Image: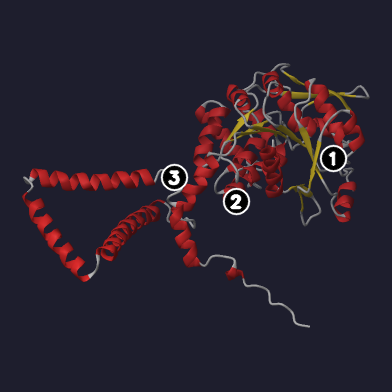
Amino acid sequence: MKTSKKPSASRYRPTTKQKKWLRGFQWFLPGLLVKRWLFVSIIGIILIVLGIAISARLTPILFLSRVIGNTLDLLVSILPRNISGPIALAIGLGLLWFGQKRALGSITQVLMPDQDKELVDLLVSHRKLNRGPKIVTVGGGTGLSNLLRGLKQYSANITAIVTVADDGGSSGRLRREHGVLPPGDIRNCLAALADEEKLVTELFQYRFKTGEGLSGHSFGNLFLTAMSEVTGDLEKAIAASSQVLAVRGRVLPATLDHMVLWAEFEDGRYVEGESNIPEAKGKIKHIGCKPENPKGLPQAIDDINEADLIIIGPGSLYTSIIPNLLVPDILQALINRNVPSIYLCNIMSQVGETDGYTVSDYVRVLDELAGVRLFDVVLVQKYPPSERSLQHYESFGSHFTYLDRENLAKIGCPVLVANIMREKNNGTVCHDSEKLAGVLMRWYNRQ
C-alpha cells in the first residue's frame, strides 16, 4: 500500500522572499501614519523644484523642459507610449520606494540595533495593541501576573488593580521598616507587562541571599521602595517605573491607605494580618480591614468606569481578590459597571482560606460581600490535573476546585468551562497565560 507524502511546509508558507514582498504592502495599512508623510515628502520635493525655478526666473526650467521633451521624443520613437510610460512610472516609484526604505532602515538600525523585528512589524503591532479593548483586572498574587502576561498580546490598554494588604516576606519587612505600601504584587505585575519581560522578571525576582539587611529582599521590591521615596508616593513610583520598563498598560494600587486585613473564624478566633490569616487554618466567617473604609485610588476608579472588559481574579480569594473589594469606591465602581465582567475561579484550593470549597462557594462568598453579582460568568478549568499533581497538592491539604453545576444553577450563575491550565514539571499547576487570554478575548468578542 502506497503512503502519501506529507506536503512540505513551503507549499503553504510563504518563502523569505515572498514574506519581504508581503511585508512591503504592510506599509500601506491604515493607521500607521506613513502614507501621509510619504505624500508630504513628495509635495515638498515638487515645491523645492518650483521654488528654485521661480528664484532663477524660470530660465533653467525652460532649458530643462526642452531637454526632457527631446528625451521623451527619442524614447517614444524607440518604444511606444503605452510601454515607455508605465516603465518610467514603475522605475520612478521603485526608486522612491527604495530610497524611503533604505532611509527608514538606517534610522531603524540606529534606534533599534538589536531588534529582531522589522520596523513595519513593530508599527503594525503597536497599532493593533493600542486599538485593543480597555481591560481592567482586579486581583493580586502570581495568578494575576500570569493573566497579564497573556493579555498584553491583545491590548496595550490594560489596567491591573492590585491589593496592597500584603504584610509578609520582603514586602512586609519593607512596610514595617520604611512605611511604604507593600510592593510585591505590583512588582510581579510590572514585570509581566514589561516589553523585555524575561530579563525584567529575572531581575525583579532576584533575591539577595547575603548581606545585612538585604538578605531575603527581592531587587524589585527594593527598586519600588526607592522609587516611592524619591517620587513621594507609590502611585508616582509605579508610573515612573512603568516608563523605565516600557510597560504595556499600567499597574495601580487599589488604595494608597495602609490596609490591615482581619478575619473572624467560625470557631470565634479573630486574626489580623494578611499573612496570618491562612496560617490560622480555619473557616473564615467574616473578613474586613483597618481602616474600615480605605479611599480608592481615583485613577483606578476612572479606569473601571471607562473599561470595555472587567476581569476579577485569579488570585487567593480572601487575601488577593477580596482586599480590593473592601475599598468601597472600587466595589461601587464594579457594581455600577455596564460592560462584560468575568470571574476567574482558582484551579486549586488554598490551604487555610478555601479548604473544601467548590466553584459555587467562591461565587457565594463574592456575592455575599458585594451584595450583588459582580460578574456575568465564572470561568472554570475543564479538566483536573494529572494524578501526580493531585497527589502533590493532597500532601499539604489542597484539592482541585470541583465544578458543582447544580448549585451554580440554583444561584443563577452561568459557567464558562475551558482548558486554561498549565502543569509544571514539579507537579504544581497554574493558569496558562496564552490559553487563558485566548479564551477571555474570544468570550469578550462574543458579547
For image coordinates 66% across by 32% down, the residue present is: 162
Disc 3 and disc 2 in contact, CB within 8 angstroms: no
Q: How dense is the environment of label 3, judged by Cα within 10 Å: few (below 14), some, or many (20 and up)?
A: some
Q: For residue 47, which quarter of the picture?
A: top left
Q: Write down the residue under mark 3.
A: 32
Q: Amino acid at mark 3?
A: Leu
Q: Is residue 359 above or below residue 109?
A: above
Q: Classify residue 409 as left or right of residue 445.
A: right
Disc 2 and disc 1 in contact, CB within 8 angstroms: no
Q: Classify residue 31 as left or right of residue 195.
A: left
Say which mark, if any, is on residue 383. Answer: none
Label 3 vs label 2: CA separation?
28 Å
276 or 35: nearer the viewer: 35
For image coordinates 73% across by 22% down, the residue present is: 326
Disc 3 and disc 1 in contact, CB within 8 angstroms: no
Q: Amino acid at mark 2?
A: Lys
Q: Write down the residue under mark 1.
A: 349
Q: Classify residue 133 as left or right of residue 286.
A: left
Q: Amino acid at mark 1?
A: Ser
Residue 342 image point, x, y percent: 73, 34
Q: Is residue 387 above or below residue 220?
A: below
Q: Is residue 36 above or below residue 12?
A: above
Residue 257 image point, x, y percent: 65, 21
For image coordinates 61% across by 47% down, the residue present is: 201
Say which mark, if any, is on residue 198. Answer: 2
Q: How dense is the environment of label 2, judged by Cα within 10 Å: few (below 14), some, or many (20 and up)?
A: few
